[in-house]
Amino acid sequence: MAHVSRNFAEGLGARHTVIAIGHLLPPSVARCLMLHTHIRAVTKVPFSDGRMFYSNGHGFGRGVASRGVEYGVDRVSMTEYLLNVSRSWYFYYSSFTPILSSLSSSIILALSLVASVTVKTFFFSSSLIDICNMAQNHEDLAAELHEELGERVPAEKKTDLAGGYIAPSIDEKKSLDKQHYASDPEFGTTPDGEEPNDHEKATLRRVGENLPASAFLIAVVELTERFTYYGAQGLFQNYISNSPTGADGAKGLGMGHQAATGLNLFFQWFCYVTPILGAIIADQYLGKYRTILVFCGFYWVGLIILWTTSLPVAMEHGAGKAGYIVAIIVIGLGTGGIKSNIAPLIADQYQRRRMAIRTEKDGERVVIDPAITYQRIYMIFYWCINVGALSLLATPFMEKYKGFWTAYLMCFCMFNVGIVTLVLRRKTFVNRPPQGSVITDAFKALGMMIAARNTDAAKPSWREANGKTKAVPWNDHFVDELKRALRACKVFIFYPIFWVCYGQFSTNFVTQAGQMQGHGVPNDLMQNFDPISILVFTPLIEKVLYPILRRAGIELRPIARITIGFWLAALCLAYAAIVQHIIYSAGPCYEHPGECAAGQDGNTKLPNNVHIAIQTPAYIFIGISEIFISVTGLEYAYTKAPPSMKSFVQSIYLFTNAFGSAIAEALVSEAKDPNFLWLYTGVGISSFVTGCIFYAIFRHYDAQEDAMYDLDRDEPTLTHNGVEPKTVDHE
């Protein structure tokens, strides 16, 4: 009988055993029996969702204490045991048909009564009186079980002749997948629109939201600015290096390839230094929107200078070189001020700060995750950037057949479209007001951290505890946000290596394309395969790859995505090195394309006998790497920055590009034949090694993403007029 009772308690009738003991025996005896009965051996058995219940593998009886110590657990009451066993076997028992369920219930009731009395008689009679006295202080067993298990019974429950619950058939049961099981009453079911509990965060699929219309308008403005920037900058290599006589294409400044690479890299460097100035003006004085308008004015003037000094009449009078130098400085100032503010401005349009539950049309319950929405925002933002970069499909042909000035004029006209859109739709944009001296406060707090060698040293609570009497104009939360921003800045330290790789496609890759047979295709047209690859692969990654991975329970967090970007950039440079080896292995001039006698046709330099199309995969690899590393950098700079320092942290991220350009500038002396092969090889290896080191150092950051987002959970909702005062009291 003890054997029967043991198997029965472990099996389908666990819940009915409790009902029989609780209702058929006198209440005091039932309580005594339950309190004195323990599990001899406790074994962990997992639920499908990873939670655990405890199962008795050896029946019940005395001698429990030693077994409990052996398994590292305290003695467990029969109540807990039956609760855990019944939770597990409930799912199996519910698969019986109603007739079999009723029959088994009747048999189980009879067996449970006999078995329980038998076990009690043989094992526990000696201490029954003491146990009964102790039992008076406990809640009634039936009430306890009803409280625990009653919620599992539907409102319209079916019962058998003995009053037991008849579970639904398999066709009637809910699926036990993660989406449905997350509604387990033990954790609670969160209504739509409310913040999910920890269990729902861990088990439900996470999704993003649609973007507001104002975000798309800002993306269009960025599209026009990037159309202008890439359309003009993509021609600079040829504009600077081409002969004034037009011997090797459209008439240029005649300064040679090395000078072209050096000036081009200086322009890129300057464009990524000036964002710091734009960020300070925006965060402390004007706000993002007004700052963008001011720097658009500088940009507009620079384009006028570039266009007018590239006219044939101006170049004939020697205005070309001076005009170009002045133009790239003014344009660099303008684009830098726009860059540091337009990326955070588009993310400001999205106002959700906390996760929320939503039920999809198919009944699936999902978690709306702001992190995924921000990821989507910057995917779309970067996609629009590369739509603008397609200006290089037109400008090289305009350069070739009409001259550089026509291409610069088209860029100027397109930029005016962006300015008009920005002005006319100004009332639709969510605008965060300037925050006063927040950047100054941040540097003061940073100085305190460095002086004390403690990142908490700037907190008022820490200062008070350590006898610092001087008051500071911020609170502990401000310091926590600053620490989060510093974390982002540490991640950005490795970015310059990527920018060295990225910079090759608009400089040395153009030169490499010119060393191959173009068959009517201008060498600087090949750059378009970079934005084209981004336009093709961005929707595939955002709409196909990421959702598939999420459904499989794999979330590519920022650090993992950045690492993949480094490795793809390394693959790009490895391929470029292979192409360069093929060029050097082909005639007529081998390692010095266009420089030998066989490579001269009058005033024209002939390329080596390699088709230009072989270079295409290099642009595709660098384009895909941008989706992983550059988009994530924009996202990371915004989400990890304090609300009052979004533009400034964005400018720090952009400044890493300036460091990359500086490193590339140092490599200009090697940017010549026959050194290109080893230049590409060295840069590619550096990118791969950097990716490995980066992941080893920062991979634990991915596990802390949700906690970082929670710092912004109480931020107020903004409008186009703002809701915050002009200055923010950090106290």
Image (tube, rainbow, N blue to C red):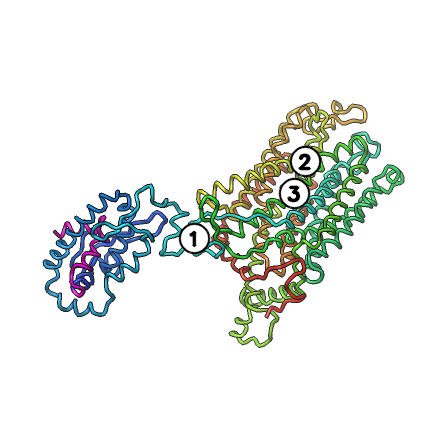
The residues colored magenta run 1-28
| Secondary structure of the residue carrying numbered label 1 | helix
- The kind of residue on which mark 1 rests is Glu
Badge 1 local density, few (<14 within 10 Å), some, or many (20+)? many
Return the x and y of residue 587 as percentages of the image width and height.
68, 23
Q: CA distance from mark 1 to mark 3?
A: 34 Å
Residue under pointer 2 = 527
The answer to whether residue 329 of the structure is visible from this angle is no
| Residue that mark 1 sits on | 200
Residue 314 placement (x, y as % from top left): 87, 40
Of the image marks 2 and 3, the number of the one nearer the N terminus: 3
Please tell me whether mark 1 or mark 2 is closer to you in this view: 1
In percent of width and height, residue 682 lies at 60, 39
* Mark 1 → mark 2, Cα distance in angstroms: 46 Å
User: Which SS class for mark 3?
Assistant: helix
Residue for badge 3: 384
Q: Amino acid type of disc 3?
A: Cys
Answer whether residue 622 is magenta in the image. Answer: no
| Comparing labels 2 and 3, the label whose residue is closer to the camera | 3
Q: Amino acid at mark 2?
A: Gln
| Disc on the earlier residue, 1 or 2 | 1
